[in-house]
Amino acid sequence: MPTEAPPDLTHATPVALPPALLLLGPTASGKTASALALAQALPVEVISVDSALVYRDMDIGTAKPSAEERAVCPHHLIDVVSPEENYSAARFRADAIRLMGEIVARGNLPLLAGGTMLYFKALRDGLSDLPAADPELRRALDDEAAERGWPALHAELARLDPEAAARLEPGDAQRIQRALEIVRLTGRPLADSYAKKEGEPLPCRLLAIALAPSDRGALHARIEERFDAMLHAGLVDEVRQLRARYRLTPPMPSMRCVGYRQVWEYL
C-alpha cells in the first residue's frame, strides 16, 4: 500500500507552549499499541487522527480500538458522526485544537495518533483558501465517472492541472473528484488555491514520533493479515448492516474508506 511521507512537523513554535505528541505511521505500523504503551507511562489523552474512526457503527473495517483499549486512557474523535455525514479536515482541525486546550487544562498530555496525513497537515499548516464542496458538481462528476471511469477524469485533470494530476493515482476517486471540483469552480490550478492559509494558532507545540517500518514486505503482510482478520470478524455483515440502517451511497466518504469500498463492490 503506497503511503505518503510524514509531514515535517518541526516548524518553529514558541517553546512556552505546552507540548502535544504526534504519533504518525502507515496502516498496521503499530500506532494503537504504541499509544497504549505511552499511556502506561504518561498522563495522555488520545485524539484520533483518522478519517474513518470518526464514523459510528464502522468498527471492524476501521480497526477501531476496543472498549478495553479505550479504557486505558481517554480517546477522542471516535464515533462522532454518522456514516451518512461528511467530516472534513477543517472540522478536524477545529475539534483537535479545542480538545488539545481542554486536555492541557486538565493537566494531561494530548497524544494525536493516526495515519490521515491530510489531517496532520491541516493541523500544522492551517487551511487553504478552497471553495466549499458543491453537491451538484460532485454528483455530476460521479455520473461522469460512472460513464467514463475515474482514469478518464484523471486524464482530464492532467490537461487542466498537470501538477495536481501528477500527485494522484488514476484510481484515487475521492482526491480526483475534489481536485476537479476545485479547478472547475475556481478556474485555477490547485496550487493557486492552496497558496492562502488561514486558521487559529495551535495551543501546543508539536512533538512528532513517526513509525516507519523498514521492511515494507513485512508491513504489507501485516496489512493482508489484518484484512483477512476483518473478514473473519464479520466485515461483510457489518457493511450489510450499515446499508440497512443508513441511507448510504458509494460516493459517500464513509463508503470510500479502504475495505468498505471493496466490500460494497462485492455486495
Image (spheres, grey):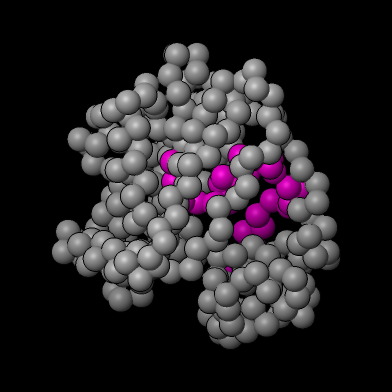
Would residue 95 be found to the left or right of residue 249 on screen? right
Q: Is residue 18 above or below residue 80?
A: above
Please state the extent of the stretch shown in magenta in the rendering: 113-139
Q: Is residue 135 magenta?
A: yes
In the image, farthest residue toward the left: 232
Front residue (pair 14, 242): 14
Would residue 170 be found to the left or right of residue 163 on screen? left
Front residue (pair 6, 100): 6
Q: Is residue 267 magenta?
A: no
| Residue 140 in sight here | no
Q: Is residue 149 above or below residue 60?
A: below
Q: Quadrant of residue 26?
A: bottom left
Would residue 125 be found to the left or right of residue 146 on screen? right
Residue under the point 76% across and 66% down? 183
| Residue 120 in sight here | yes
Instruction: Tell me the quarter of the image containing the C terminus.
Output: bottom left
Residue 151, horizontal then vertical, whole percent? 59, 82
Residue under the point 44% across and 32% down? 111
Residue under the point 30% across and 57% down? 61
Instruction: Tell me the quarter of the image containing the N terminus.
Output: bottom left
Residue 129, horizontal then vertical, whole percent? 77, 48
Would residue 169 be found to the left or right of residue 103 on screen? right
Front residue (pair 258, 83): 258
Residue 92, horizontal then vertical, whole percent? 54, 40
Front residue (pair 172, 186): 172
Total tally of numbered discs in the picture? 0
Residue under the point 28% across and 28% down? 40
In the image, farthest residue toward the front: 214
Residue 140, horizontal then vertical, whole percent? 63, 71
Q: Is residue 136 above or below residue 119?
A: below
